[in-house]
Amino acid sequence: MSAVHARQSPLPLVLDRVSLAAGGVAILSDISLTLEAGPRTVILGPNGAGKSVLLRLCHGLLRPSSGAIEWRARRNGRRPDAMVFQRPIMLRRSVRKNVEYGLKLAGAGAAERRATAMQRLEAVGLAHLAGRPARRLSGGEQQRVALARAWALDPEVLFLDEPTANLDPTATRMVEAIMLAMHTGGTKIVMTTHDLGQARRLADEIVFLHRGRIVEHAPAAAFFAAPKSPEAAAFIRGELPV
Amino acid sequence: MPERSDALSTALALVAGADPALWSIVGLSLAVSLSAVALAALFGLPVGAALALFRFPGRGALVTLFNGMMGLPPVVVGLVVYLLLSRAGPLGDLGILFTPSAMVVAQTILIFPIVAALARQTVEDAWLEYEEQMRSLGATPRRSIPTLLWDTRFSLATAVLAGLGRASAEVGAVMIVGGNIEGLTRMMTTAISLETSKGDLPLALGLGIVLIALIVLINALAQAMKALAQARYG
């Protein structure tokens, strides 16, 4: 019973009529969204649609002006979610120490931190750079360190905000492979992108955002085959949003 | 101008010849200013970082106050510390007026706002970059203080050295609370002031040369350290 309880997923994450306004300008309006455990969710939309803000609301970095954001269950003390940003912030210390940092905050002991960090670095293919100063790594390598750092926290949900927007195709491929590996390991993936190709490659379901509103929320195959809204149809055809 | 070139050559001889009087003054100056810098850094760095990360009523006023106090007139600091430490003053029982301890206190007060204000600026700039990532990893602002101090350590070294430069160059505060007592509280700056007024230009000039050399050396070290760190840690 208690073992079952411990494995209880914190998902779904339910957003109920969430709005966010800043300085009288509506950034997100009336967002109702349920993020279920399982499918890889891609939040798609043009620049300025509010994708990043939506992700930050889900991750708790921003508070909504109105509406509610609720996890089904909270893990004891520790947050269930982690986030990878478009531009990773590396602490001025070694790669391994960067990966250990979140674990240190969570109160893990030195030996455990080290073991977990090395395991995750192995998984992202950077174990050989563990001792290097993190800021001296390339952008793609830094993003993989950021993934390892998030992964070390064993999140139930990983939010990714345009994680490959600044990366070349090779680095992009590596980052996507790591995300897929984490998903295979049981982590829910919620990621934003404005890159249609990436959305096609990775999405199980699409949340299409346009001017701060959810215009469509559909399985990826259905969304790309037959978008229901003119905005999504135009976006898929590659038209510039008006 | 034979007299002046005489003074210069004598000064150089004093410096080169390791004149014990000169070097004891240099030693005391360094001991006092380095102690003051260590104390100012010990308190000023965390205070500056806290000011950068916490939001509370009166924060803006405090930031303005520290910024303003970066330019505290040394003689006024000296006067205030003198009043506190004089026998009739509230801290008179300590009996440290006219000792190196009093000079350390005065210089600490003088440079604490410099260290705190520069640290506040440095950490606040870093926080703009780090905040979301830190909060995402589960760090509270309080927990972020040591992390940010460590991550900005090379820039903060510059702030601390600015304090050291200020301490080693000031004359007003140590003159008042130290009294410029030979062999006890005579610093480079107070000695230069005294010897010049007495007309003993060689010693004054010799001390001046050492003082300037030290300050240049400190700044060169700071720059080298920063360049090295930049190359090593990015």
Image: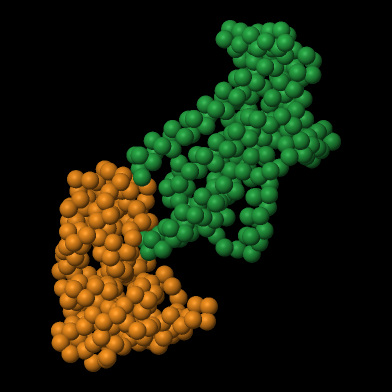
Task: Please identify the residue farthest to the front as the structure is shown.
Answer: B1
- From this viewpoint, is residue A72 visible? no
**Which residue shows up at 55% across the image and 27% down it?**
B216
- Vertical relation: A166 (above or below) B150: below
Image quadrant in which the N terminus of chain B is located:
top right
Q: Colour of chain A?
A: orange
Task: Indicate the position of residue B175 as horizontal and vertical percent values.
Answer: 75, 28
Q: Is residue A196 left or right of residue B28?
A: left
The quarter of the picture where residue B39 lies is top right
- Vertical relation: B197 (above or below) B91: above
**Which residue shows up at 46% across the image and 54% down it?**
B126
Q: Is residue A145 left or right of residue B35?
A: left
Nearer the observer, A89 or A189: A89
Nearer the observer, A198 or A30: A198
Task: Indicate the position of residue A66 as horizontal and vertical percent values.
Answer: 46, 84
Task: Indicate the position of residue B10 as horizontal and vertical percent values.
Answer: 65, 8
Q: Is residue B59 left or right of residue A124?
A: right
Task: Please identify the residue farthest to the right as the structure is shown.
Answer: B88
**Which residue shows up at 58% across the image and 7% down it?**
B17
Task: Indicate the position of residue A129 as horizontal and vertical percent values.
Answer: 22, 46
Q: Colour of chain B?
A: green
The quarter of the picture where residue B167 lies is top right
**Which residue shows up at 60% across the image and 24% down it?**
B212
Q: Is residue B19 left or right of residue B126?
A: right
Image quadrant in which the C terminus of chain B is located:
top left
The quarter of the picture where residue B106 lies is top right
